[in-house]
Image (cartoon, rainbow, N blue to C red):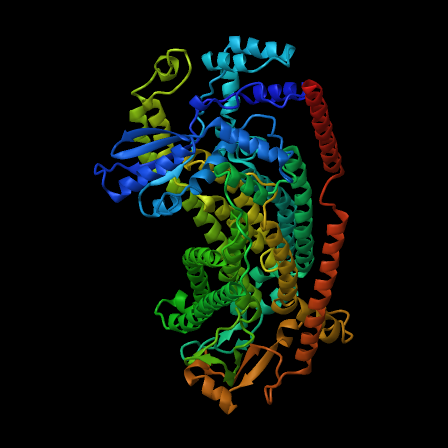
């Protein structure tokens, strides 16, 4: 395609502004030089065929709207190049000017950018119906058209000659000169290639969308001009999120190193490693009794993330999530104010586009049906029950898999049956996530169809909330079970809880937090790594396969833009070969649709959830997220610029309902981390032991305060008890050839009746008190942080006030000038 440079457009806008002229000095994008959209269909020889008739009827409807259609046949496919008339964009600009929320977007007196043209034409295509009542979406489903796409701009820049530059200088000296003759002269002028400005034209591809720019900044303004504000805000948000992950990742590493510093000196680890305590079998029949010292390695690992620093880090991350959102709102406000879309309203623009498409259109009525809302609520509830049922199925898998693996002849599998079952469960959970993601999307779309929303923006919000809710339950149901239920409902020797004859699984010997750590590590590493590999390799392989076809066609017309692609008057109008070459280059790219950007947002918001909600169990989560995001930014940029078809540019002023979703995640993070520390970790039992039952509390100052803690958390089961004897076989109760008459297990129970001791109730009371205190303190800190950091910087407020005042003065000056001219 052929465009003016950014400098030329900006310069002419400034001159127009000072001259108080409302008409553009230069034609925005000459209609003979660009295509706004391309439709592709299969060539049908039979004119009576239903597909051919529908195809022809749709094209006729577009021509009635004065959209010019260029038809080119290639390889049994028909390519339709679409150009919208200039009058259509003039109507759009005028309606923007008189609208309530979009009237100072900065385009009403300037050039219509190619991104705006694409957005308008895309809307018109989807709102065009043939006589059977079918629109383009239905025609695509019925294979009347194969696909539709907007074009990536040609990377070789074509610019104005020195003669044209002299014309622009003349306009600068005479700002009131009429534009009719100038426009005609510009159309006759032949463009040439400028190396200096070609470098800027290639900036997105050569500097941003490449792996060598991994640690360079993002040209957000260029992204906005090319892909629209919506994509630009995604990269702006992702860059800001990545930047603020740095302090969180550093503190997480400090917490990890704090645990590592006391790796070999902790009395708790020494007590486990030097213990001779015999523990009860972990499963039925084949699992024998085992020594507590066998878990020495796991005890060391668990101390890396279950230590005193974890509490401070969890509090920090809860406040960090609030500061991140508040600072993001300020960061967003600066950019949307510069882009002149601070007050932009997507619903209002949709009304404008409806009028541009059909001046006699009627507004869509707002509708609310209690019957539909009730039906949607019931279906959502059923879907959530299904998702939680799958989480229970994973629990049953681990319950059944652990004893079966203990029967294996492989000694490693036999000795680590519980750990292997947990890791296999995590992998199976990942596979379930991949399958349910597609199911969740289909269900969310059907629920949106039932709701019958009033606008595309409303449909997008509704779909986002439903899809994220389903994905959240899919991802976190199993984690919530591991964090808060695993090992707490399995019973005790003599009274085990069973499912179909199998004992419920217990926590890892080193503690329940180890199981949550394993689940988090496997899911985060698998999800981020494999997803990124598939995201890049699939479109890259498709691009490699189709590259040969595009190159063969390119060789047919090597000097088109110098000679062959000019008409008699010297105007640049590509020949059919050049048009087709550009169309095929875009056609062979991977498909992109309305879900493309949504998928990227969903992936990052889910990662944000992992980083904040269970960070107490996995302090290295921010570090993994930071490393992933550094590559994610370039990966997404390469996909959008090089490997995928161009996204339809959309104008907006915020990331939409995702802001509310992030706020909800911040609240859940406070609750979840408080429960993980208070319920899942050993922080509270250690605290109670230190100040109530330990040596320091009983008057032994020369002994470490935590000496004897491990033994204090264990209860004893005697084989002489009939109920205990029924749970264990005689072959299980032998070690080193000697019979064992008693074994220990993690719980606070008496040795006679196996009832809960007073220490259990004290620990439980302190746990609940800590959770309540933690959540209230952190929530207060969050509110203080939100109050302390205002959403809008003072500079943004002053700039907006100045822009409004300037615009009102210009409107008043124009009104008086027109009034004096009429007189």
Could you tell me which quadrant the C terminus lies in? top right
Q: Position of residue 733 (x, y in %)?
A: 46, 82
Q: Nearer the viewer, residue 556 or 243?
A: 556
Could you tell me which quadrant the N terminus lies in? top left
How many marks the image carries: the answer is 0
Q: Position of residue 168 (x, y in %)?
A: 58, 12
Whether residue 336 sits left or right of residue 162 in the image: it is: right
Residue shown at 56%/54% (left/top)? 366
Position of residue 689 relative to residue 131, above or below, is below
Q: Nearer the viewer, residue 260 or 422?
A: 422
Whether residue 660 sits left or right of residue 201 in the image: it is: right
Q: Position of residue 70 (x, y in %)?
A: 35, 28
Whether residue 70 sits left or right of residue 604 in the image: it is: left
Q: Nearer the viewer, residue 529 or 371?
A: 371
- The residue positioned farthest toward the left in the image shown: 46
Q: Position of residue 430 (x, y in %)?
A: 44, 58
Q: Is residue 589 visible?
A: no
Q: Nearer the viewer, residue 275 or 75?
A: 75
Position of residue 797 relative to residue 443, above or below, is above
């Amino acid at each position: 395609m052929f465009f003016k440079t950014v400098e030329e457009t900006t310069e002419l806008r400034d001159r127009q502004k000072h001259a108080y002229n409302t008409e553009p000095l230069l034609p925005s994008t000459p209609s003979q030089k660009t295509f706004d959209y391309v439709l592709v269909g299969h060539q049908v020889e039979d004119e009576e065929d239903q597909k051919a008739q529908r195809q022809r009827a749709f094209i006729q409807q577009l021509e009635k709207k004065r959209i010019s259609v260029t038809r080119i046949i290639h390889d049994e496919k028909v390519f339709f190049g679409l150009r919208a008339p200039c009058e259509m964009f003039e109507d759009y600009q005028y309606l923007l000017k008189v609208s309530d929320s979009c009237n100072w977007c900065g385009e009403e007196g300037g050039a219509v950018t190619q991104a705006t043209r694409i957005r308008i034409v895309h809307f018109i295509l989807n709102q065009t119906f043939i006589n059977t009542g079918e629109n383009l979406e239905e025609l695509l489903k019925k294979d009347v058209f194969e696909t539709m796409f907007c074009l990536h701009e040609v990377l070789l820049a074509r610019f104005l000659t020195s003669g044209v530059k002299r014309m622009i200088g003349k306009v600068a000296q005479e700002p009131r000169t009429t534009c009719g003759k100038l426009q005609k002269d510009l159309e006759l002028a032949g463009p040439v290639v400028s190396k200096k400005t070609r470098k800027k034209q290639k900036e997105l591809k050569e500097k941003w969308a490449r792996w060598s720019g991994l640690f360079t900044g993002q040209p957000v303004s260029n992204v906005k001009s090319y892909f629209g504000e919506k994509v630009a805000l995604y990269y702006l948000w992702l860059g800001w999120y990545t930047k603020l992950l740095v302090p969180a990742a550093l503190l997480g590493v400090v917490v990890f190193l704090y645990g590592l510093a006391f790796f070999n000196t902790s009395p708790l680890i020494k007590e486990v490693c030097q213990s001779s305590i015999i523990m009860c079998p972990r499963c039925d029949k084949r699992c024998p009794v085992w020594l507590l010292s066998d878990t020495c390695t796991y005890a060391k690992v668990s101390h890396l993330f279950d230590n005193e620093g974890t509490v401070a880090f969890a509090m920090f991350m809860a406040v960090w999530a609030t500061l991140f959102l508040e600072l993001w709102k300020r960061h967003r406000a600066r950019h949307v104010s510069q882009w002149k879309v601070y007050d932009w309203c997507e619903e209002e623009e949709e009304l404008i586009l409806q009028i541009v498409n059909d001046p006699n259109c009627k507004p869509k009525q707002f509708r609310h049906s209690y019957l539909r809302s009730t039906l949607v609520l019931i279906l959502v509830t059923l879907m959530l029950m299904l998702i939680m049922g799958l989480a229970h199925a994973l629990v049953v898998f681990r319950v059944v898999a652990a004893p079966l693996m203990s029967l294996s002849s492989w000694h490693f599998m036999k000795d680590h049956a519980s750990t292997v079952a947990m890791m296999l469960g995590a992998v199976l959970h990942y596979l379930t996530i991949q399958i349910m993601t597609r199911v969740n999307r289909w269900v969310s779309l059907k629920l949106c169809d039932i709701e019958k929303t009033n606008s595309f923006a409303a449909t997008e919000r509704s779909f986002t909330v439903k899809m994220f809710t389903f994905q959240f339950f899919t991802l976190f149901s199993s984690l919530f079970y591991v964090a808060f239920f695993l090992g707490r409902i399995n019973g005790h020797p003599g009274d085990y809880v069973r499912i179909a004859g199998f004992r419920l699984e217990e926590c890892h010997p080193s503690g329940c937090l180890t199981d949550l750590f394993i689940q988090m590590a496997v899911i985060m590493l698998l999800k981020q790594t494999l997803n990124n590999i598939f995201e890049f390799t699939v479109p890259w392989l498709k691009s490699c396969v189709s590259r040969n076809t595009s190159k063969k066609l390119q060789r047919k017309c090597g000097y088109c833009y110098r000679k062959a692609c000019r008409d008699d008057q010297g105007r640049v109008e590509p020949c059919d070969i050049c048009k087709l070459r550009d169309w095929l280059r875009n056609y062979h790219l991977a498909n992109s649709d309305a879900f493309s950007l949504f998928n990227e947002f969903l992936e990052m918001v889910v990662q944000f959830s992992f980083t904040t909600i269970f960070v107490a169990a996995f302090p290295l989560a921010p570090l993994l997220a930071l490393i992933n995001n550094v590559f994610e930014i370039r990966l997404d940029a390469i996909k959008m610029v090089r490997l995928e078809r161009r996204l339809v540019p959309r104008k907006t002023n915020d990331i939409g309902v995702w802001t509310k979703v992030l706020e909800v995640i911040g609240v859940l993070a406070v609750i979840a981390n408080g429960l993980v520390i208070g319920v899942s970790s050993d922080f509270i039992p250690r605290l109670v032991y230190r100040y109530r039952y330990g040596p320091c509390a009983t008057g032994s100052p020369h002994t470490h305060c935590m000496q004897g803690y491990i033994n204090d958390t264990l209860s004893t089961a005697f084989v002489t008890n009939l109920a205990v004897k029924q749970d264990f076989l005689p072959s299980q109760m032998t070690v080193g050839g000697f019979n064992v008459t008693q074994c220990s297990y993690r719980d606070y129970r008496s040795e006679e009746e196996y009832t809960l001791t007073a220490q259990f109730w004290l620990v439980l009371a302190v746990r609940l008190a800590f959770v309540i205190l933690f959540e209230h303190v952190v929530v207060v800190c969050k509110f203080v942080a939100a109050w302390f950091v205002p959403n809008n910087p003072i500079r943004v407020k002053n700039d907006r006030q100045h822009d409004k005042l300037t615009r009102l003065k210009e409107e008043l000056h124009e009104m008086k000038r027109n009034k004096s001219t009429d007189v």
